[in-house]
Amino acid sequence: MHKDVTPVWHILGAGAMGCLWAYYLKSAGHPTTLLLKNCAALERFLSTGNITINSATSLASLPVRAELTTQKGNIDYLLLTTKAYDVIPALSAVAHRLHPNSVVILMQNGMGIAEQVCQQFPELNFLLATTTIGAHRNAPFCITEAGLGPTYLGNFAQCMDPNLAQQVYNYLCESNLDISFEPNLNARLWQKLAISCTINPLTAILNCKNGELIKSDEGIQLIKAICDEVETIAQANKIAINQPYFQQVLNVAKQTAENYSSMWQDIQRGRQTEIQYTNGFVIQQGENLQVETPTNQWLIDIFNQLEEESSQAHTHEKNYSDYLH
Ligand code: KPL
């Protein structure tokens, strides 16, 4: 059933990454539907019916379909771009629409999600993706592309039939985004984890752009200490490391110097962050392996306090906007 047909995509998680992929899949001629959680979001989207993408050189809009997650109708190809902590509730919300041949691609920051999905949805055909694309949301369904890097797709613990995985990869290639099938996705996931454990929480705590972190010796030393702990755990897990994580993080901080990280944005908006799936995952792995992770622990303690303060500061705003909708 998966051969020689145009795939029909559903995207769940209409943040920057979800909107970006919806836009590129639709522009490749794939029917694409955004799945939205509530009527307020659906109404907001339907007022234009478009996804808008700003880049350094252009501003473009494209109409896509949208519907509520609770609607009926099979989902064949689902790209899940929610925050890590929303993956299980999101899959549960559309479980009635998935069938034995449905394919789900999980694209989140952080690690530990795939294991939870395997446990709770043992029958699911799923692939993992990790991306280096930089994008942020300016307004609902309107995003800025801040650098199109590669995205890597891989099969978690051979959960998916390799032919089907290849077919999905071919479909994604039609989007014209830079995508590679990665037989050793774990190495990519750990690289990204090192980046997410350093740039993301540090920019949020210090309230700065990515590039500011490497302008002081203290910032660089902190990045090094965090990376060393992540690398020790990765090595204990036999993960291939082709370039020291510290070096990779410095490169990304330089390349994305003018960006505000996704965690910085979450804290500014009073939203829950993915810290439990980044530094929290490293600390948990350290405990399992009896490896100390004092810098990650110190960082997460400060961060938890910041997250709490930011959530409280935005409670009033949230109540007000609930009332308006
Ligand atoms: O992926 C990112 C994020 O913001 O989550 C980085 C690489 C840190 C770029 O801002």
Image (tube, rainbow, N blue to C red):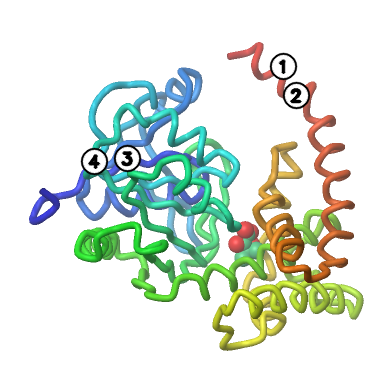
- Check the image and report above or below for 98 versus 156: above
Which of disc 3 and disc 1 is earlier in sequence? Answer: 3
* Mark 2 secondary-structure assignment: helix
Label 2 sits on residue: 317
The amino acid marked with disc number 4 is Pro
| Image point (66%, 69%), residue name | 195
> Is the distance from the Cβ of mark 2 to the nearest ligand 1 atom less than 8 Å?
no
Image quadrant of ligand 1 equals: bottom right
Q: Which mark is residue 100?
A: 4
- Check the image and report above or below for 241 versus 157: below
Q: Residue furthest top?
A: 323
Query: What whole-number distance in Å separates the C-alpha atoms at marks 4 and 1?
Result: 42 Å
Q: Position of residue 51 (x, y in %)?
A: 40, 41
Q: Which mark is residue 10?
A: 3
Along the viewing direction, whichever of 24 and 289 lies nearer the viewer: 289
Where, by quadrant of the figure, is residue 76 drawn? Answer: top left
Q: Is disc 3 surrounded by few (<14), some (14 to 19) or many (20+) residues within 10 Å?
A: many
| Image point (54%, 61%), residue name | 134
Query: What whole-number distance in Å separates the C-alpha atoms at marks 3 and 2?
Result: 31 Å
Which of disc 2 and disc 3 is earlier in sequence? Answer: 3
Which of disc 1 and disc 4 is earlier in sequence? Answer: 4
- Check the image and report above or below for 235 versus 50: below
Query: What whole-number distance in Å separates the C-alpha atoms at marks 1 and 3?
Result: 31 Å
Q: Position of residue 237 (x, y in %)?
A: 61, 74
Label 1 sits on residue: 320
Query: What whole-number distance in Å separates the C-alpha atoms at marks 4 and 3?
Result: 16 Å
Q: Say which of marks 4 and 2 sits in front.
A: 4
Which of disc 2 and disc 4 is earlier in sequence? Answer: 4
